Amino acid sequence: MSGSVMVGDSSSWSRALVKISPYTFSAVGIAIAIGVSVLGAAWGIYITGSSLIGAAIKAPRITSKNLISVIFCEAVAIYGVIVAIILQTKLESVPASQIYAPESLRAGYAIFASGIIVGFANLVCGLCVGIIGSSCALSDAQNSSLFVKILVIEIFGSALGLFGVIVGIIMSAQATWPAKTV
């Protein structure tokens, strides 16, 4: 008796996922792309900024030079905004009869996956750039010759966000909606 209930319950997830509108998946993916990217940028700015302010007490000369780390963190949020705009342009209206067609579902899932990839790649990138920016500020306060060396590492950390954007754009290329029948 409980075995038949288990079989029904196990397939209910697949039925639920197929019955959710592809436009809902698309909207959630776009929201994750921009929201989580901004969260990563804010977290990175928080980490870098607090170390920059603290280290500037000992060496006020580092304040303007180390603002580049904050700019790198802000670029992470801009990556999310750019991808959200790109994903938004992928949305097309389809007739109600084709909203659950396999092509519509694939388009919704592709935009959703693209948003998740970009959002979480930029979250990790924001943390990476924030931590490296923090160490850049602290080490620059001790020895100014280390600034450029650590800045190069920070640029490599910032490239992680660009990799997420590239993969997200490639994933969103799968978002083709069914052609409208006239």
Image (cartoon, rainbow, N blue to C red):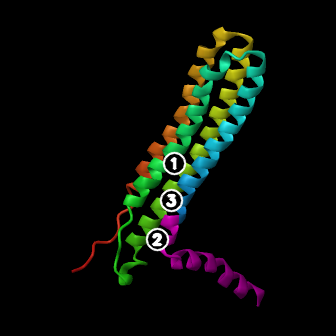
- Which corner quadrant holds the N terminus? bottom right
The location of residue 2, given as percent across then percent down, is 77, 86
Q: In the rendered structure, which disc, 2 or 3, sits on the residue that comes first in sequence?
A: 2
Closer to the camera in the image, 14 or 71: 71
In the picture, the disc for residue 80 is 1
Q: Which element carries disc 2, helix, strand or loop?
A: helix
Alpha carbon distance from label 2 to label 3: 10 Å
Q: Is residue 144 above or below residue 81?
A: above
Q: Label 2 is placed on what type of residue? A: Tyr
According to the picture, the residue beneath numbered tag 2 turns out to be 23
According to the picture, the residue beneath numbered tag 3 turns out to be 30
Q: Which element carries disc 1, helix, strand or loop?
A: helix
Q: Is residue 36 above or below residue 57?
A: below
- Which corner quadrant holds the C terminus? bottom left
Q: Are marks 2 and 1 in contact (CB under 8 Å)?
A: no
Q: In the rendered structure, which disc, 3 or 1, sits on the residue that comes first in sequence?
A: 3
Q: Residue at x 74, y 32 (%)?
A: 50
Q: Residue at x 54, y 64 (%)?
A: 28
Q: Which residues are magenta?
A: 1-27
